[in-house]
Amino acid sequence: MKTFMAKKAEIKRDWYVIDATDQTLGRLASKVASVLRGKNKPIYTPNVDCGDYVIIINASKVKLTGNKLEQKMYYNHSGYVGGLRERTAKVMLEKYPVEMVERAVKGMLPHNRLGRQMGKKLFVYEGSEHKQQAQQPKELK
């Protein structure tokens, strides 16, 4: 019996929409990362991007457990001396909820070219409206 290896031309991609309202950030991110990689399909191949497109709506209503709102820090560095900027999860959720959800999901993807390619199939929106109605996305529970 031969092992099945998916080819780039054979892959059929679907569109899914996920409502992040009252969902825990980490659990949501791991589920989305799995769909972006294609691990929910029987044709999954590690070295081929066989994942689907994912739209996340209501990113501003995502939930964090424990004391993460006050204690979890997000860091950026400009590259200049003294250019470190740090924000708490509470600030990120209030001002930059899209970036917070994107960081959580992209952190669970492979850190290479393939992972960056998978990350481009993720669309995150702060509110309940999105621009991909033409793709007729299915609800993912």
Image: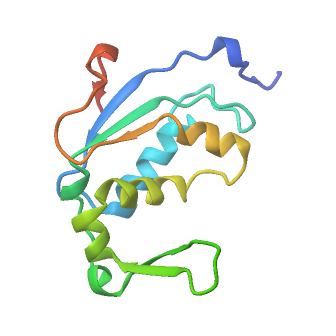
Q: Is residue 141 visible?
A: no
Left or right of 23? Residue 44 is: right
Percent across and percent down for residue 136 are 29, 16
User: What residue is shown at x 18% (from left), y 34% (from top)?
Assistant: 129
Q: Is 133 above or below relative to 117? A: above
Residue at position x 75%, y 36% in the image: 47
Q: Residue at x 65, y 12 (%)?
A: 10
Of residues 93 and 1, the one nearer the viewer is 93
User: Can the viewer see residue 92?
Assistant: yes
Residue 30 quadrant: bottom left
Q: Is residue 84 above or below residue 24?
A: below
- Residue 132, by quadrant, is top left
Task: Using the image as rendered, state which of residue 121 and residue 65 is in the foreground.
Answer: 121
State left or right for residue 55 relative to residue 7.
left
Q: Nearer the viewer, residue 7 or 2?
A: 7
Taking the spot 47% from the left edge, 79% from the top edge, the residue there is 85
Tell me where residue 119 appears, x and y as whole percent: 54, 42
Residue 5, x across and y down, in percent: 76, 24
Residue at the far right in the pictured view: 2
Compared to 50, does 56 lie above or below?
below
Which quarter of the rendered picture does the N terminus lie within? top right
Left or right: residue 50 compared with residue 34: right
Rendering colour mode? rainbow
Q: Nearer the viewer, residue 20 or 59?
A: 59
